Amino acid sequence: MVAERLRATALRALAAIFVTAGVETGFQATAAEPVEVRVYPAVRRTIAGVGELDRNRYFAMCDDGRNFPKRMRPDGISDYLLTELNATFGRSLGPISTVTRGEAVREDPNRPGFVDLDRLREACSARRWTPSDDYARLMNGRLNVASHGRAHEFPEFLGEYTTTQGDRDNKKHRHRLPKNLDAAAELSVVALDAGYSDFDRPAYYEPINEPHWSFITTDQLADWHTKTHAAMKDRGVPVRVGGPCLSVAYFYRNGFRAFDGLQQFIEKTDAGLDFYSFHVYDYVNWDGSNLVGRVTSGLPIEGVLDFVQTYANNVHGKSLDLVVSEHGGYISGSRGRPDSEALGKLLVGERDGLEGFELTMRQRGVASHVLVSAAIGNTLAFMEHPHVVKKAVPFILPESMAWDPEYYSTMYVPHGFEDRSRWIETANSDFFKFFRDVSGHRVYARNGDPDLQVRAFVDGSTVRVVMNNVSDAAHTVRLAMPVAESFSVRRYGRNDDFTPYLREAEADPNEPIDLAGREAVVVVADYGRPVPTRKLMSETPRYSQQTAQAAENGKAVRFVVNTPDPDSVVYAELRIAVSRPTNASPEVSVRVNGKRVRVPVEDAAGRYDDGEKEYASTKLVALDPALLRATNRIGVSFPDGEPGVIGSVVIRTGEQRSAAKSSVAFRP
């Protein structure tokens, strides 16, 4: 007992490094108050055992990478994207049709309703592509792409499964699924096996991209995925199969009942697929003074990710791997162009001597900022869930000149949208420029302001701190970390005309860093010698036993979260996913084991209210570890007495582990 008390005392002393003592540990910052962000370069941080930042997961273009150097025809563009910006490949559309065009797919005369496999293998093998040795080495031996199928990749002789609702929504094409699922699974397996090498074969396969909503809860869609998954495993093809590749991720809608479709799909597939998937987008429109709408990036997606895993651990006894093969944001309209084009002209008049194509390119920057800013907010959230988010691809394409030279989400367009001999870079490439050198292992950073997404990494002698202000309010940050030999700040933000800027300059490490509203920065601090690891903090998500609990009339709803060894916890964060009717107060009242804790209210609360249906966000609270018990009872209520739903409650606990010793003197 004495030894245990001494151990607990020592850990509590260490905890003082990380959190402010006292019961009410949440720090509520306003735009007028400086925010202290304290970075500990020598304290390595893992999340559910994952410490290294895998760039291949997050900084990938929407492209399959096949024959990329040749396709990017102007000299130097391929090298620029792959070696200077360190972009990788992440998403492709139509992996089956890519290798089965023409007469490759015929019905087997001896097996009506099935594909002639001999002809299919022969045709697929003929379309195999072999990369150069240099390209293969550059890509570390595999492209690691997530690929989803086109709605009409499967031949009609497999039969068609339709729904009344899908037929009624037949605007661009018919919504259908293959009827003969055994034949469809067989076609996918053979095409992905014979048509690709280990280098370019998709790592993740979604049989269909964004299926019509009426298919989501059907046995047909679930059985198609289950049969394809089983066939891929039986044939030994190294492709992970999952889905359903939903078009939206706002599961917080209707008090988290918007999750019902994905929940049914998970249960119909017995939570047995290799991964589950959805796309994440912000949908915004101009209200006369700002871009507003359904914003999921930033705090809301944090709650979505927590909620999905809380459900999975409670119902299925495990976490579920996730793939996000598209994410970003756009101004609502047909492909985002008509509305964004008109808005660009409204906000960006003829100025600075610009006219014609050059003026149009600046006007398109309005839509680019919506896309890139949302992708930054999403990516920083995905980084906090490396144990489950296996791939997350911003919807940014290298180019689309063959099918739509004016497409809103490309990095290159032809000059004048016609001259394909002159490729013009767009502002969408700012995403990759912003993150171009973010790498290394995670280190601990303490931040008390929910409006700031803060992530810190060490790579050799360099510390990089990424901070993203998700609110429209300016914030001043006092960055507390050891003084470096060199110090610079890279900024991505929004001009007064809503077009983006990206700039970088050396800075004084002793001066505060001002972040404008919706501005993101990468702070680069180099110490001239490798930064050693003095301590290792192992962070573990602890999920509540309850999900989607409604609270009203100011009464608290109860959640239970277990922390098996509370005395070993050095720091803790409480995370609460909430959904409330539009214009309801963003304030939340919380008690942990009977003790009231202060919950910061984000300045971004207005952005997270779509003005029509709901306000959705995630409340982040730094907890004093002394509050924790083996079984923690958390009460959550809404002080205004209006209704709301708490999707999930998660406590992330940080515990000290052993770390390698270093003789290099480095004191955080």
Image (cartoon, helix red, strand yellow):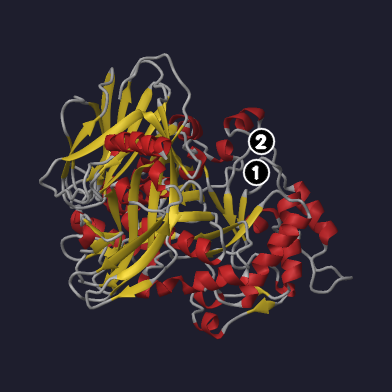
Question: Quick one: label 2, few (<14), some, or many (20+) residues within 10 Å?
Answer: some
Image quadrant holding the N terminus, namely top left
Q: Position of residue 477 (x, y in %)?
A: 19, 38
Q: Residue furthest left?
A: 32
Kindly identify which residue carries mark 1. Answer: 200
The residue nearer to you, when weighing 1 against 137, is: 1
Is the Cβ of the residue at disc 1 closer than 8 Å to that at disc 2?
yes
Q: Position of residue 338 (x, y in %)?
A: 33, 64
Residue type at tag 2: Pro
**Which residue is located at x 72 percent, y 64 percent?**
185
In the rendered view, would you say 533 is above or below 69? above
In the rendered view, would you say 223 is above or below 369? below
Measured in 3D between alpha carbons, the distance from the residue under mark 1 to the one under mark 2, in whole angstroms, is: 9 Å
Q: Which label is found at residue 495? A: none
Can residue 647 be seen here?
Answer: no
Residue type at tag 1: Asp
The residue nearer to you, when weighing 571 against 599, is: 571
Kindly identify which residue carries mark 2. Answer: 131
Q: Residue furthest bottom?
A: 164
Q: Position of residue 248 (x, y in %)?
A: 44, 65
Q: Position of residue 375 (x, y in %)?
A: 37, 50
The residue nearer to you, when weighing 404 against 84, is: 84
